[in-house]
Amino acid sequence: MDKIKNMVPSIVESCLETMEKWNLSLASNKSIEVDMVPEIDALIVDIMSKTVVAGRISEETRRMYQLRNTVNQQAVKLAKLMYFPGRWNLPTQEVKTLKAAHKEIQSLVKKVVTRRLDEMKNGAGNQGDILSLIYSEWQERAREEVLQVFGDQKPNVEGLKQLTIVTMIMYEALRLYPPTGLVHRSISRDTKLGDMVLPAWIQVTIPITLMNHDPDIWGEDVKQFKPERFKEGISNSKMQSIFFAFSGGPRKSIGQSMAMHGMKLVLRKLV
């Protein structure tokens, strides 16, 4: 809520500007009829532009708004067709239009975000937009830890082991955004799982994304970015049974250590 409070002035400003536009139209008429759907759509776009990237509607955000409508229209057409594997690869006009719109939206988002990040690097203040609020506290803590451990030295394995805050951040990021959403396993023998007995040779699907966002497992703040969840690491028995960023047990990814060390080295250079 504290972050949302910072956005209130921008939201109010957008509302007042919209109302002022209506008042100007009314000034020369006794009454006017306003189609609220496009008016509110435009208001929402203006609010999102200000609160996400701290800027007024630009050519990029206006184009993204148009493309959003295109995506919705094509998605509705596709939804009416029977689903079958590989439908996304058909050379139909609907699929081509949808892919092209997605690609252009990605390019525009990257352009807008990069511009805002450059402004922040050049000293632009916190204007209450989302980009200026994301994880800033933990970013500073990670930077302080890296400088304390390495200073101006090149990173080394022993030093990487001391990056506890960086490791906590990485694990929490993997929890919120797991690299794979599902893991499939076949059971080679009858297995008791809680109150259930699973017969041999059935396939079990572990929904990692759903588990990682389950409030019964992680608490009501499950959607929040809180690296302190991992202050005890993941070697304790509780974490081993619920955290599957790299799968678990004898089938755990053999690339876990390489991935973690690689990410730490990258973060070491970035922060």
Image (spheres, rainbow, N blue to C red):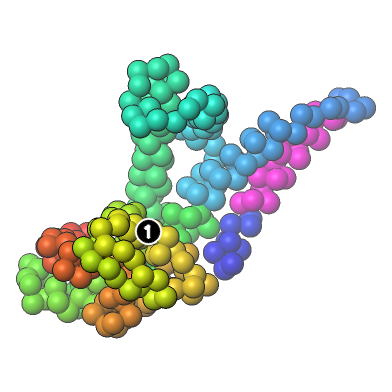
Residue found 28% across the figure and 82% down from its top: 237
**Within 10 angstroms of label 1, few (less than 14), some, or many (20 or more) residues?**
some
Locate the N terminus and report the quarter of the image it occupies.
bottom right
Quadrant position of the C terminus in the picture: bottom left
Q: Is residue 130 left or right of 202 when viewed as pictured? A: right
What kind of secondary structure does the magenta stretch mostly adopt? helix
Q: Is residue 103 visible?
A: no
Q: What element carries label 1?
A: strand
Residue 93 spot, x, y in % from top left: 42, 16
Which residue is at the far right? 30
Residue picked out by circle 1: 207
At x 25% / y 58%, what residue is drawn?
201
Residue 142, compared with residue 80, is above or below; it is below
Splitting the image into 4 quarters, where does residue 188 fall?
bottom left
Q: Position of residue 202 (x, y in %)?
A: 30, 57
Depth check: 242 or 30 in front? 242
For the point 22% across and 59% down, the residue is 270
**Quarter where residue 267 is shown:** bottom left
Q: Can residue 202 be seen in this view?
A: yes
Task: Give amino acid for label 1.
Answer: Pro
88 or 27, which lies in front?
88
Magenta stretch in the rendered image: 10-27
x and y percentages locating residue 110 in the rendered image: 36, 40
